[in-house]
């Protein structure tokens, strides 16, 4: 992983995974803990001031944004909007052990709909891919209208024809 200047930077994923594995040992007796799952993290991608990835634990799947360099973050519990290529994502600021302040956006919690670590990894990877895809531009109105079949009635009375089709 490299920063904006091309210099190598540390991927926060392994440190986050190790910390959440330690936390998982203490969470194991809670009802939200899914014992069929394991802690996993996707590769993190640099986007602006953050490294962004997806973390899977036996109790949640979250988008995780870790500041790429020293920057002031809102206080824990505050909302932070991540401007990702797919669109804005609201995240909650929190502390993640040795990694420090992070922003988290829940994808799934609790994780009782999953029973396979392979499936959770595939979902996490797909979620990260989706976050970095730019949405397709909207189709221009004229092209949409030209693509619809037109009869005389809809040409002369477009509103009535649209209402009748509904």
Image (cartoon, rainbow, N blue to C red):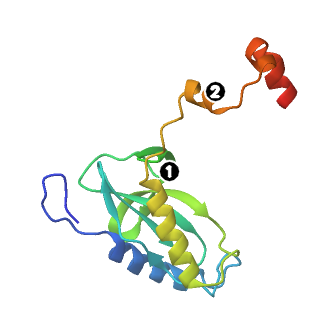
Whole-percent x, y for residue 134 in the image: 43, 47
Q: Looking at the image, is mark 2 or mark 1 earlier in the sequence? A: 1
Residue with the most extreme right position: 164
**Which image quarter: residue 97?**
bottom left
Q: CA distance from mark 2 to mark 1?
A: 38 Å
- Quadrant where the C terminus lies? top right
* Residue at image coords 71%, 78%: 31
Q: Is residue 68 above or below residue 33?
A: above
User: Quick one: 110 or 160, which is closer to the camera?
Assistant: 160
2 and 1 marks in contact (CB < 8 Å): no
Residue 155: which disc?
none
In the picture of the structure, the residue carrying the numbered disc 1 is 91
In the image, 103: left or right of 72?
A: right
User: Quick one: 165 or 24, which is closer to the camera?
Assistant: 165
* Residue at image coords 63%, 33%: 147
* Residue at image coords 34%, 67%: 99
The residue mark sitting in front, 2 or 1, is 2
* Secondary structure of residue under mark 2: helix
* Secondary structure of residue under mark 1: strand
Residue with the most extreme top position: 156
> Looking at the image, can residue 57 be seen?
no
Q: Is residue 154 above or below residue 64?
A: above
**Which image quarter: residue 98?**
bottom left
Whole-percent x, y for residue 136 in the image: 48, 43
**Which image quarter: residue 112?**
bottom right
Q: Is residue 85 above or below residue 64?
A: above
- Crowd around label 1: few <14 · some 14–19 · many ≥20 (10 Å): many
In the image, 139: left or right of 1?
A: right
In the picture of the structure, the residue carrying the numbered disc 2 is 145
* Residue at image coords 78%, 18%: 152
């Amino acid at each position: 992983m490299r920063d904006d200047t091309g210099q190598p930077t540390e991927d926060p994923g392994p440190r986050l995974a190790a910390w959440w594995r330690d936390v998982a040992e203490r969470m194991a007796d809670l009802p939200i803990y899914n014992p069929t799952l394991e802690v996993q993290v996707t590769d993190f991608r640099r986007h602006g001031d953050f490294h962004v990835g997806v973390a899977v634990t036996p109790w949640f799947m979250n988008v995780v944004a870790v500041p790429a360099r020293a920057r002031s973050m809102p206080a824990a519990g505050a909302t932070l909007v991540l401007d990702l290529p797919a669109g804005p994502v609201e995240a909650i600021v929190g502390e993640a052990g040795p990694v420090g302040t992070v922003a988290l956006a829940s994808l799934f919690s609790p994780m009782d709909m999953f029973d396979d670590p392979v499936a959770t990894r595939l979902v996490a990877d797909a979620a990260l891919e989706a976050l970095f895809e730019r949405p397709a531009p909207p189709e221009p109105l004229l092209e949409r209208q030209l693509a619809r079949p037109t009869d005389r009635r809809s040409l002369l009375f477009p509103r009535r024809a649209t209402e009748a089709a509904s």
